[in-house]
Amino acid sequence: MSTLEIKDLQVSVSTDDGPKEILKGVTLTIDDGETHAIMGPNGSGKSTLAYSIAGHPKYDITGGSVTLDGEDVLAMSVDERARAGLFLAMQYPVEVPGVSVSNFLRTAKTAIDGEAPKLRTWVKDVNAALEQLNLDPTFGTRSVNEGFSGGEKKRHEIAQLELLDPKVAILDETDSGLDIDALKVVSEGVNRFRAKDGKGVLLITHYTRILRYIQPDRVHVFVDGKVAESGGPELAEELEANGYERFLTASV
Ligand code: ADP
Ligand code: MG
Ligand code: MG
């Protein structure tokens, strides 16, 4: 089971001019096994939503709630959230010089499961994940994200998704900067994940392009820190045809 419930979430960041409200009451529920897309213009607060759910310390939760299968996510530390089954693929993955991809994946897996993975099956699983993502086996020896191309960064995020096997994956612009081949490989990885029983996906994107490969159950248009409209996949088609204009004028 995996139900992520976000209710009236309000989030601020502190700036030189004092606190700035970014999320202004976000409500949405990803029911068991559903994939939801959040689409919105730049600066509408999509990454803030992702980071707030993952527990980034920069963001102050000033109201509302987030629960995963009824558990209070906002009361958990960042690593408790990961152990509870939340996964975030960041829009801009950070470089970790000196830490190899293999070590990083194994450390993350150990932290989440509470025990080290069995070496033989683990090596097999890692190699299979890399191969499915068209990543060279030597990829495991490279420092995390250091000198990675945009496509390699995003494929590495999907390798984590496959190996860490969370309940709910939040993917923040996993499609940005990908050429068409990488987009397909990444989309296939996400589709493999969502084909498993009861997995939830929150797919954050600026463009409708990825939604041709990953069909969402629900689409939410995100404008100025809240959901302006929700609908089925047809809403993405409308956005593809008409852009965000209708929603932007409506919000002024
Ligand atoms: P999106 O991901 O939709 O492009 P973001 O969540 O990155 O939007 O940003 C939403 C708004 O919050 C933007 O106006 C951005 O400038 C502002 N913002 C985000 N983080 C900070 C921060 N740490 N300090 C000041 N403003 C921020
Ligand atoms: Mg942005
Ligand atoms: Mg963003």
Image (cartoon, helix red, strand yellow):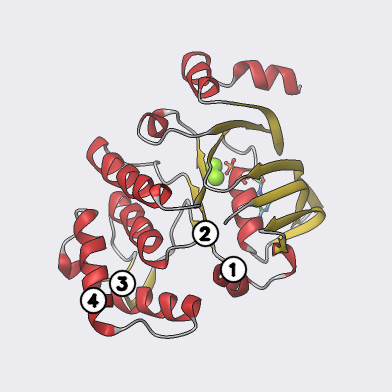
Q: Residues within 10 Å of mark 2 (few under 14, many from 20)?
A: many
Percent x, y of residue 115? 44, 85
Quadrant position of residue 116: bottom left
Residue at point 78%, 49% (across, down): 10
Q: Are marks 1 and 4 in contact (CB under 8 Å)?
A: no
- Compared to 169, does 245 lie above or below? above
Q: Are marks 1 and 2 in contact (CB under 8 Å)?
A: yes
Q: Which residue is mark 2?
A: 167
What is the secondary structure assignment of the residue under circle 3? Answer: helix
Q: Are marks 2 and 4 in contact (CB under 8 Å)?
A: no
Q: Nearer the viewer, mark 4 or mark 3?
A: 4
N-term mark: 2 or 4: 4
Q: Which residue is mark 3?
A: 101
Q: Residues within 10 Å of mark 3 (few under 14, many from 20)?
A: many
Percent x, y of residue 58? 68, 62
Residue at point 72%, 55% (across, down): 66
Q: Is mark 3 within 8 Å of ligand 3?
A: no
Q: Which residue is mark 4?
A: 123
Q: How many marks?
A: 4
Residue 224 visible in the displayed image: no
Q: Which residue is mark 1?
A: 84
Question: What type is the residue that disc 4 sits on?
Answer: Val
Q: Residues within 10 Å of mark 4 (few under 14, many from 20)?
A: some
Question: What type is the residue that disc 1 sits on?
Answer: Ala
N-term mark: 1 or 2: 1
Percent x, y of residue 63? 83, 53
Q: CA distance from mark 4 to mark 3?
A: 12 Å
N-term mark: 4 or 3: 3
What is the secondary structure assignment of the residue under circle 2? Answer: loop
What is the secondary structure assignment of the residue under circle 1? Answer: helix
